[in-house]
Image (cartoon, rainbow, N blue to C red):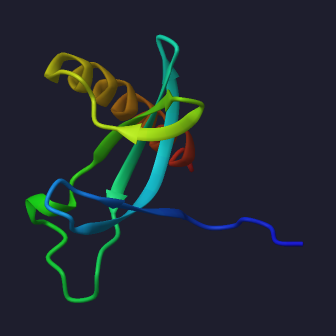
Amino acid sequence: MQEDFGPDFITVTDEDGNDIELELVDALEHKGVTYMAFFPAVEEGADEDSDDYGMVILKSITENGEDFLSTLDSDEELDEVYALFMERLFEDEEEGGDGE
């Protein structure tokens, strides 16, 4: 029996045909849609501060009975969901860092 511990990784292909490995950070449901936040997997020697290593938000959609990950439809949708993920991230940090 295999038990899942540790990070979840997926590989997606961008519009140029490049494979990108992403690590799942969090998922949430908003307005009936499941959104997932990822960070690109960092390769050894890579510059983690570059623009290529920011948060990636994708949504789960179902077409013809199959689940897919898709980009968000608008900047407004992206801004709204990004704010929700950031709230959750900072809530988790506040709860875990209360050692006084």
Q: Is residue 89 left or right of residue 28?
A: left
Residue 28 pos. (x, y %): 51, 30
Q: Which of the two residues, 32 or 19, is positioned nearer the viewer here? A: 19
Residue 67 pos. (x, y %): 54, 38
Q: How many marks?
A: 0
Quadrant position of the N terminus in the picture: bottom right
Give the residue at x 35% y 70%.
41
Quadrant position of residue 7: bottom right
Q: Which of the two residues, 20 or 30, is positioned nearer the viewer here? A: 20
Give the residue at x 72% y 65%.
4
Residue placed farthest to the top in the image? 31
Give the residue at x 20% y 88%.
45
User: In the figure, 1 relative to 58: above or below?
Assistant: below
Q: Is residue 26 left or right of residue 77?
A: right
Give the residue at x 57% y 50%.
99
Residue 3 pos. (x, y %): 80, 67
User: In the figure, 29 relative to 85: above or below?
Assistant: above
